[in-house]
Amino acid sequence: MTKKLWSPTQQTVKNSLLSQFTNAVNGEGIGQFLDYDALHQWSIENPADFWSAYWDFAELQASHKGAIAVEDLDQFPGARWFPDAKLNYAENLLTTRSNKTAFVSIL
């Protein structure tokens, strides 16, 4: 099957969080990522920089971010993300006041 079942409109792509993140990273002078493939390649080659930039973009709330984005990346599983960070998961999950589902629990 070679026919695409669906493609997003240009407006949907433009308004996506991925496009917003790419624009933010480009605006910070980190790089000029013109497409998904370039951003993806950067994330693979520079995971600490990528995740640090995403932390900032996502506006995570923390009393301490720490200087290290990832530790022991070669031990996957086993890598530690932002090992020095001090944050409250629930605070970040419930930051947005909306009618959207914040989390789902299945027992």
Image (cartoon, rainbow, N blue to C red):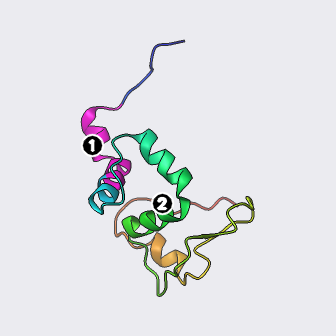
> Was residue 16 drawn as part of the magenta stretch in this picture?
yes
With 98 as the anchor, is 49 left or right in this view? Answer: right
In this rendering, is residue 10 above or below 34? above
The amino acid type of the residue labelled 2 equals: Phe
**Left or right: 16, with 78 as reference point:** left
Question: According to the image, label 1 marks what residue?
Answer: 14
First in residue order: circle 2 vs circle 1: 1
Badge 2 crowding class, 10 Å Cα cut-off, few under 14, some 14 to 19, many 20 or more, is: some
Tell me where residue 79 appears, x and y as whole percent: 69, 66
* Residue pictured at 36% horizontal, 61% vertical: 99
* The C terminus, quarter of image: bottom right
**Secondary structure at numbered mark 2:** helix
Q: Position of residue 41 (x, y in %)?
A: 50, 46
Contact (CB < 8 A) between labels 2 and 1? no
Q: Residue furthest left?
A: 11
Q: Magenta: predominant secondary structure element?
A: helix
Q: Which residues are magenta?
A: 8-22
Residue at numbered disc 2? 50
